[in-house]
Amino acid sequence: MADYDYDVGPEGEEDFYPDFYPDNYALSDDDKLSPWNEQEGLPPMSLYQLYYSCIYPTISDGLNHIFKAVAWCVVYRITTQTVKIPQQFSHIVSIACGSMVMYHFFGHHLFYMLAQGVIAYLSLVASSSGSKKVNGWMCMLICISFLLICELFIVDAVHWHMIRAAQMLVAMRAISIGFQLDENVLPNLPKPLPYFGYLYNVGTVSFGPWIPYKDYLNIETHNHCLGRCVVNILKTFVLSLLFLTVSACFTLWLIPSGSSKWFLAYRDAMSFRTSHYFVSYLSELTSLAAGIDTSQTGRWSVTVTRPWHVELPRSLVEVVIHWNVPMHTWLKTYVFRVARPYGTFFAILGTYGLSALLHGLNFQLAAVLLSLGFYTYTEHAIRQKLASVFSACIQARKCGSNCGHQWKESHWAVRICNFCFSLLAMFHLAYLGLMFDSSKLQEEGYSWLHAIKKWKWLNFSSHWIIVSTFAFNYLI
């Protein structure tokens, strides 16, 4: 079987929900058994009523958090990038402003983030003193162990749910430094000030994204094209609020609780995805406000997600790539490529398995990630075989201009085939995404029985389809 690589193709390229979610529907006996009963909907109302009951309070609450985060990013940028200051002082300002943002969102629980950074650094100091290049794996083991111990024995479920994403980002940054030491990308372990300045930089500490260490060190050099930066900041600001209102208000308003179960599944999945887009664009906003530019072309941009590739996907493989671009890059660089010599299937499941561990002991998330690993492997394999048999551009990733297939993307039959695969990917995406909602129980994490109940309500239809596809791929 050919190699599997979900890299960018050759053609280039805190949920702030309001407390008011009234649900005045009378539930039938069948509805009372529905797993969507916990996901409260909105009663019938006009757009005017929706604005005052949901949109306005949601945006007000969101702005309160956004402005505080952006304000500290601006303080950091003005202090470190408008005048020439010693580099050590720049790292101190990065740590101080990042700590203020952490305290705003997480309160005294920021201690766990600080503790993880210190423990990871001590592990890097210990491992880098040896002759073997095990810095990355040692740091990964220490960070994951710390996360699991905190989740199981120290922090209560509600507060861990609140901080676990930020904890994961701290771990990812520390682990990436370890692997860069192993690969000689970094000649030596960074000193404490630049290390902690990178881990707790105000632009990325709360919402992400993960950025390479070199991008953090280059922040001070990105002080040109201020007008373009302001335009991109305004664009990401508007998009973040747009997706926030879609997630918290419009999906629940357009698809009420009395709808069929498949519409409800699509609603819950859509609400979850748009919530993710909100946080992703918010992370772009804070990164840009702090002076971070990852475009490598001076365009002043930070790409975290590409919603159009997720909502209208060519394949689930593309969903994985564009869902969270920095996370995908991190997993591909430090997990997938390392595990690839042991077999493609093992590398894929290992990548998704490690991602699940970094996210914590959450059954619903682990079930979705591991399912997604099996789905993407099966999808890639079957489409690659069909593309070879029919000599058509119907692979999971878009072919290059010189792919050698007889039937190109522009052929009507190829278009129809790719469109059908896109519809199937959207079906799988709705099925997998319904595992997440905004109910109160979600804050602590569902039990495995409750999580399975959601898929059982849809007769495990998506899983049956992908298992059949896997069997068909094996037989041919």
Image (cartoon, helix red, strand yellow):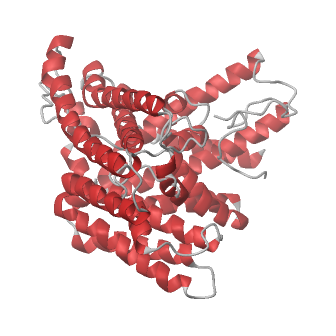
Name the one closer to the observer, 142 or 437: 142
Q: Which x, y percent locates residue 391? A: 85, 31
Image quarter hosting the C terminus: top right
Rendered residue at 63%/25% (across/down): 420
Q: Which x, y percent locates residue 129? A: 55, 87
Rendered residue at 37%/33% (across/down): 274
Residue farthest along the bottom direction in this orientation: 130
Rendered residue at 75%/47% (across/down): 475
Rendered residue at 27%/36% (across/down): 36
Name the one closer to the observer, 401 or 204: 204
Q: Which x, y percent locates residue 242? A: 33, 26
Left or right: 252, with 2 as reference point = left
Is 58 placed above or below 47 here?
Answer: below
Left or right: 69, with 214 as reference point = left
Q: Quadrant of residue 250?
A: top left
Count of numbered circles on the image:
0
Name the one closer to the observer, 399 or 395: 399
